[in-house]
Protein backbone atom coordinates (compact mmCIF):
# COMPACT_ATOMS: atom_id res chain seq x y z
CA UNK A 1 0.00 0.00 0.00
CA UNK A 2 1.23 3.47 -0.91
CA UNK A 3 0.55 6.39 1.43
CA UNK A 4 0.40 10.13 0.68
CA UNK A 5 0.74 12.53 3.61
CA UNK A 6 -0.31 16.18 3.81
CA UNK A 7 -3.09 18.68 4.44
CA UNK A 8 -3.98 19.02 0.73
CA UNK A 9 -6.02 22.24 0.84
CA UNK A 10 -7.59 22.63 -2.59
CA UNK A 11 -6.38 19.20 -3.77
CA UNK A 12 -4.64 21.17 -6.51
CA UNK A 13 -2.46 20.13 -9.45
CA UNK A 14 0.60 19.69 -7.24
CA UNK A 15 -1.33 17.51 -4.80
CA UNK A 16 -2.58 15.39 -7.68
CA UNK A 17 0.99 14.46 -8.58
CA UNK A 18 1.45 13.27 -5.01
CA UNK A 19 -1.84 11.39 -4.94
CA UNK A 20 -1.86 9.67 -8.31
CA UNK A 21 -0.11 6.50 -7.05
CA UNK A 22 -1.49 6.57 -3.50
CA UNK A 23 -3.87 3.94 -2.18
CA UNK A 24 -4.27 5.75 1.16
CA UNK A 25 -3.98 9.27 2.54
CA UNK A 26 -3.07 10.62 5.96
CA UNK A 27 -4.39 14.14 6.48
CA UNK A 28 -5.86 16.42 9.15
CA UNK A 29 -9.34 17.75 9.79
CA UNK A 30 -8.01 21.22 10.67
CA UNK A 31 -5.11 23.24 9.33
CA UNK A 32 -1.95 22.89 11.47
CA UNK A 33 -1.73 26.69 11.69
CA UNK A 34 -4.88 26.67 13.83
CA UNK A 35 -2.65 25.16 16.54
CA UNK A 36 0.73 26.78 15.79
CA UNK A 37 -0.46 30.32 15.00
CA UNK A 38 -4.26 30.69 14.99
CA UNK A 39 -4.04 34.38 14.11
CA UNK A 40 -2.22 33.44 10.88
CA UNK A 41 -4.37 30.46 9.91
CA UNK A 42 -5.24 30.85 6.22
CA UNK A 43 -8.68 31.10 4.70
CA UNK A 44 -9.20 27.65 3.22
CA UNK A 45 -9.97 26.72 -0.37
CA UNK A 46 -12.30 23.83 0.52
CA UNK A 47 -14.38 22.63 3.44
CA UNK A 48 -13.05 19.60 5.31
CA UNK A 49 -15.90 17.52 3.86
CA UNK A 50 -15.06 18.54 0.28
CA UNK A 51 -11.37 17.89 0.80
CA UNK A 52 -11.84 14.45 2.34
CA UNK A 53 -14.24 13.45 -0.45
CA UNK A 54 -11.77 14.59 -3.11
CA UNK A 55 -8.95 12.69 -1.41
CA UNK A 56 -11.04 9.53 -1.22
CA UNK A 57 -11.51 9.71 -5.03
CA UNK A 58 -14.96 8.08 -4.96
CA UNK A 59 -13.85 5.39 -2.56
CA UNK A 60 -10.69 4.38 -4.43
CA UNK A 61 -8.46 5.56 -1.57
CA UNK A 62 -8.55 5.00 2.15
CA UNK A 63 -8.43 8.34 3.99
CA UNK A 64 -7.36 8.72 7.62
CA UNK A 65 -8.05 12.23 8.96
CA UNK A 66 -6.62 13.12 12.36
CA UNK A 67 -7.51 16.20 14.39
CA UNK A 68 -4.39 18.37 14.53
CA UNK A 69 -4.07 19.03 18.26
CA UNK A 70 -1.34 20.44 20.51
CA UNK A 71 -0.55 16.86 21.55
CA UNK A 72 -0.12 15.82 17.92
CA UNK A 73 2.02 18.89 17.23
CA UNK A 74 4.29 17.81 20.12
CA UNK A 75 4.63 14.24 18.84
CA UNK A 76 8.23 13.20 18.23
CA UNK A 77 9.27 12.01 14.77
CA UNK A 78 9.81 8.53 16.25
CA UNK A 79 6.27 8.47 17.63
CA UNK A 80 4.92 9.60 14.26
CA UNK A 81 6.79 6.76 12.52
CA UNK A 82 5.31 4.26 14.98
CA UNK A 83 1.81 5.66 14.43
CA UNK A 84 1.87 5.30 10.65
CA UNK A 85 3.17 1.73 10.97
CA UNK A 86 0.25 1.05 13.29
CA UNK A 87 -2.42 2.78 11.18
CA UNK A 88 -1.13 1.43 7.86
CA UNK A 89 0.27 -2.06 8.57
CA UNK A 90 0.53 -2.92 4.85
CA UNK A 91 2.54 0.22 4.12
CA UNK A 92 4.93 -0.05 1.20
CA UNK A 93 5.91 3.51 0.15
CA UNK A 94 5.31 6.96 1.61
CA UNK A 95 4.81 9.68 -1.00
CA UNK A 96 5.54 13.21 0.16
CA UNK A 97 6.42 16.67 -1.10
CA UNK A 98 10.04 17.69 -1.48
CA UNK A 99 9.91 19.98 1.56
CA UNK A 100 7.87 17.73 3.87
CA UNK A 101 8.72 17.62 7.57
CA UNK A 102 6.85 16.14 10.51
CA UNK A 103 7.00 15.77 14.27
CA UNK A 104 7.71 18.39 16.94
CA UNK A 105 9.58 21.34 15.52
CA UNK A 106 9.49 19.81 12.04
CA UNK A 107 12.43 17.62 13.05
CA UNK A 108 11.27 14.60 11.04
CA UNK A 109 12.34 14.31 7.41
CA UNK A 110 12.10 11.72 4.62
CA UNK A 111 15.69 10.73 5.47
CA UNK A 112 14.61 10.07 9.08
CA UNK A 113 11.97 7.59 7.87
CA UNK A 114 14.37 5.91 5.47
CA UNK A 115 16.80 5.33 8.33
CA UNK A 116 14.01 3.45 10.08
CA UNK A 117 13.25 1.15 7.19
CA UNK A 118 10.55 3.09 5.36
CA UNK A 119 10.50 3.51 1.61
CA UNK A 120 9.92 7.20 0.90
CA UNK A 121 9.50 8.86 -2.49
CA UNK A 122 9.73 12.64 -2.69
CA UNK A 123 7.48 13.89 -5.48
CA UNK A 124 8.64 17.00 -7.38
CA UNK A 125 6.47 20.09 -7.19
CA UNK A 126 4.06 20.91 -10.00
CA UNK A 127 4.79 24.25 -11.60
CA UNK A 128 2.71 26.84 -13.41
CA UNK A 129 4.28 29.72 -15.31
CA UNK A 130 7.67 28.73 -13.99
CA UNK A 131 6.78 28.75 -10.29
CA UNK A 132 5.66 26.14 -7.80
CA UNK A 133 1.93 25.47 -7.49
CA UNK A 134 0.82 25.83 -3.86
CA UNK A 135 -2.32 26.51 -1.88
CA UNK A 136 -0.76 29.81 -0.78
CA UNK A 137 -0.19 30.87 -4.38
CA UNK A 138 -3.77 29.95 -5.30
CA UNK A 139 -5.10 32.02 -2.40
CA UNK A 140 -3.01 34.97 -3.58
CA UNK A 141 -4.47 34.66 -7.09
CA UNK A 142 -8.00 34.50 -5.71
CA UNK A 143 -7.35 37.49 -3.48
CA UNK A 144 -6.51 39.43 -6.65
CA UNK A 145 -9.67 38.19 -8.34
CA UNK A 146 -7.63 36.08 -10.75
CA UNK A 147 -9.95 33.08 -10.81
CA UNK A 148 -8.53 32.04 -14.20
CA UNK A 149 -5.04 31.58 -12.72
CA UNK A 150 -6.52 29.77 -9.73
CA UNK A 151 -8.35 27.39 -12.05
CA UNK A 152 -5.13 26.61 -13.92
CA UNK A 153 -3.38 25.72 -10.67
CA UNK A 154 -6.33 23.84 -9.18
CA UNK A 155 -6.96 21.87 -12.36
CA UNK A 156 -10.62 22.93 -12.25
CA UNK A 157 -12.64 26.13 -11.72
CA UNK A 158 -12.58 27.54 -8.20
CA UNK A 159 -15.97 26.91 -6.61
CA UNK A 160 -17.76 27.25 -3.30
CA UNK A 161 -20.86 25.63 -1.88
CA UNK A 162 -23.26 27.11 0.63
CA UNK A 163 -26.78 27.40 1.93
CA UNK A 164 -29.22 29.65 0.11
CA UNK A 165 -30.40 32.32 2.53
CA UNK A 166 -32.96 35.11 2.49
CA UNK A 167 -31.56 38.46 1.39
CA UNK A 168 -32.76 42.05 1.70
CA UNK A 169 -34.47 42.23 -1.69
CA UNK A 170 -32.04 44.90 -2.91
CA UNK A 171 -31.25 43.11 -6.16
CA UNK A 172 -34.94 42.73 -7.00
CA UNK A 173 -35.46 46.45 -6.38
CA UNK A 174 -32.71 47.15 -8.91
CA UNK A 175 -34.21 44.78 -11.47
CA UNK A 176 -31.49 42.16 -10.92
CA UNK A 177 -32.88 39.65 -8.39
CA UNK A 178 -30.26 37.53 -6.66
CA UNK A 179 -29.89 34.22 -4.92
CA UNK A 180 -27.89 34.77 -1.76
CA UNK A 181 -25.44 32.00 -0.90
CA UNK A 182 -23.85 31.70 2.53
CA UNK A 183 -20.54 29.89 1.83
CA UNK A 184 -19.96 26.87 4.06
CA UNK A 185 -16.41 28.17 4.57
CA UNK A 186 -17.68 31.48 5.97
CA UNK A 187 -15.21 34.03 4.64
CA UNK A 188 -13.55 33.33 1.30
CA UNK A 189 -9.99 33.93 0.05
CA UNK A 190 -11.56 35.84 -2.84
CA UNK A 191 -11.16 39.46 -3.85
CA UNK A 192 -14.32 41.49 -3.53
CA UNK A 193 -15.85 42.07 -6.89
CA UNK A 194 -18.12 40.92 -9.70
CA UNK A 195 -17.59 37.59 -11.44
CA UNK A 196 -19.08 35.52 -14.24
CA UNK A 197 -20.15 32.24 -12.64
CA UNK A 198 -21.76 28.89 -13.37
CA UNK A 199 -24.38 27.28 -11.12
CA UNK A 200 -26.61 24.19 -11.33
CA UNK A 201 -29.41 26.62 -12.25
CA UNK A 202 -27.49 28.20 -15.13
CA UNK A 203 -24.96 30.93 -15.81
CA UNK A 204 -24.88 33.94 -13.57
CA UNK A 205 -23.34 37.19 -12.44
CA UNK A 206 -22.07 37.08 -8.85
CA UNK A 207 -20.96 39.77 -6.46
CA UNK A 208 -18.78 38.88 -3.50
CA UNK A 209 -18.90 41.93 -1.28
CA UNK A 210 -21.01 44.24 0.86
CA UNK A 211 -22.98 46.26 -1.76
CA UNK A 212 -21.46 49.60 -0.67
CA UNK A 213 -23.70 51.71 -2.94
CA UNK A 214 -26.65 50.80 -0.70
CA UNK A 215 -25.32 52.92 2.19
CA UNK A 216 -26.83 51.96 5.53
CA UNK A 217 -28.55 49.02 3.82
CA UNK A 218 -25.20 47.53 2.80
CA UNK A 219 -24.06 44.23 4.27
CA UNK A 220 -21.87 44.26 7.37
CA UNK A 221 -19.83 41.31 6.07
CA UNK A 222 -19.24 40.05 2.52
CA UNK A 223 -22.13 38.14 0.95
CA UNK A 224 -22.20 36.05 -2.24
CA UNK A 225 -25.10 37.32 -4.35
CA UNK A 226 -25.83 35.50 -7.63
CA UNK A 227 -28.01 36.93 -10.38
CA UNK A 228 -28.99 34.27 -12.93
CA UNK A 229 -28.70 35.39 -16.54
CA UNK A 230 -31.82 33.41 -17.49
CA UNK A 231 -34.84 32.34 -15.50
CA UNK A 232 -34.29 28.93 -13.86
CA UNK A 233 -36.62 26.09 -14.74
CA UNK A 234 -37.50 25.44 -11.11
CA UNK A 235 -37.15 26.81 -7.57
CA UNK A 236 -33.65 27.15 -6.09
CA UNK A 237 -32.38 24.27 -3.95
CA UNK A 238 -31.48 24.62 -0.29
CA UNK A 239 -27.77 24.60 -1.11
CA UNK A 240 -25.92 25.60 -4.25
CA UNK A 241 -22.41 25.38 -5.69
CA UNK A 242 -21.07 28.45 -7.47
CA UNK A 243 -18.12 28.05 -9.87
CA UNK A 244 -16.17 31.17 -10.79
CA UNK A 245 -15.47 31.50 -14.52
CA UNK A 246 -13.87 34.95 -14.80
CA UNK A 247 -13.37 38.26 -13.03
CA UNK A 248 -15.36 41.19 -14.39
CA UNK A 249 -14.55 44.15 -12.11
CA UNK A 250 -13.81 45.11 -8.51
CA UNK A 251 -16.65 46.03 -6.21
CA UNK A 252 -17.03 49.78 -5.75
CA UNK A 253 -19.53 52.34 -4.51
CA UNK A 254 -21.42 54.17 -7.25
CA UNK A 255 -22.63 57.76 -7.08
CA UNK A 256 -26.25 56.65 -7.36
CA UNK A 257 -28.45 53.58 -7.52
CA UNK A 258 -29.16 54.49 -11.15
CA UNK A 259 -25.45 54.34 -11.95
CA UNK A 260 -25.25 50.94 -10.27
CA UNK A 261 -28.25 49.67 -12.25
CA UNK A 262 -26.65 50.75 -15.53
CA UNK A 263 -23.36 49.10 -14.58
CA UNK A 264 -25.12 45.83 -13.67
CA UNK A 265 -26.68 45.75 -17.14
CA UNK A 266 -23.20 46.08 -18.66
CA UNK A 267 -21.87 43.43 -16.27
CA UNK A 268 -24.57 40.97 -17.34
CA UNK A 269 -23.70 41.50 -20.99
CA UNK A 270 -20.05 40.94 -20.13
CA UNK A 271 -20.85 37.76 -18.20
CA UNK A 272 -22.91 36.37 -21.09
CA UNK A 273 -19.91 36.83 -23.36
CA UNK A 274 -17.55 35.10 -20.95
CA UNK A 275 -19.30 31.93 -19.83
Image: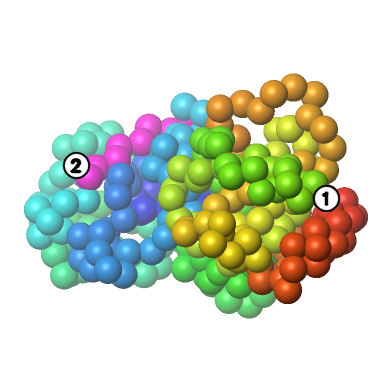
Label 1 or label 2, whichever lies nearer to me, is 1
Identify the main secondary structure in magenta. Answer: strand
Residue plotted at (43% across, 50% down)? 186
* Residue 245 left/right relative to 74: right
Q: Is residue 62 located in the magenta-colored stretch of the structure?
A: yes
For numbered disc 1, what is the local secondary structure? loop
Residue plotted at (36% across, 69% down)? 99
* On-image quarter of the N terminus: top left
In the image as oriented, which residue stretches furthest toward the bottom? 130
In the image as oriented, which residue stretches furthest toward the top? 234
Give 35 or 75, whichever is nearer the viewer: 35
Residue 189 pos. (x, y %)? 50, 62
Q: What coloring was used for the rendering?
A: rainbow
Residue 266 pos. (x, y %)? 87, 61
What residue span does the magenta drawing correspond to?
Answer: 60-67
Mark 1 or mark 2: name the one nearer the start of the chain.
Answer: 2
Residue 32 pos. (x, y %)? 27, 58
Residue 200 pos. (x, y %)? 70, 33
Give 152 or 94, whichever is nearer the viewer: 152
Neighbour tally class for label 1: few under 14, some 14-19, many 20 plus, Cα within 10 Å: some
Q: Can residue 270 be seen in the rendering of this structure?
A: no
Please tell me in which quadrant of the rendered image residue 239 appears. top right
* Residue 83 left/right relative to 34: left
Residue position marked by numbered label 2 in the rendering: 85
* Residue 182 left/right relative to 265: left
How much space separates mark 1 and mark 2, taking CA atoms?
A: 49 Å
Q: Is residue 194 located in the magenta-colored stretch of the structure?
A: no
Neighbour tally class for label 2: few under 14, some 14-19, many 20 plus, Cα within 10 Å: few
Residue position marked by numbered label 1 in the rendering: 275
Please tell me in which quadrant of the rendered image residue 121 appears. bottom left
Amino acid sequence: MNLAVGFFDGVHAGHQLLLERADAVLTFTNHPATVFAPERAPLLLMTAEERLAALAADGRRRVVARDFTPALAAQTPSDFAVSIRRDFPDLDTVFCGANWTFGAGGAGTPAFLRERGFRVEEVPFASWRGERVSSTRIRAALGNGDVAAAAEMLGRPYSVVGDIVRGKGLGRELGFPTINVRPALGNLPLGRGVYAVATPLGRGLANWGVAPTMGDRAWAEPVLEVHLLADPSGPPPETMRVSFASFIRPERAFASVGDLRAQLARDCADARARC
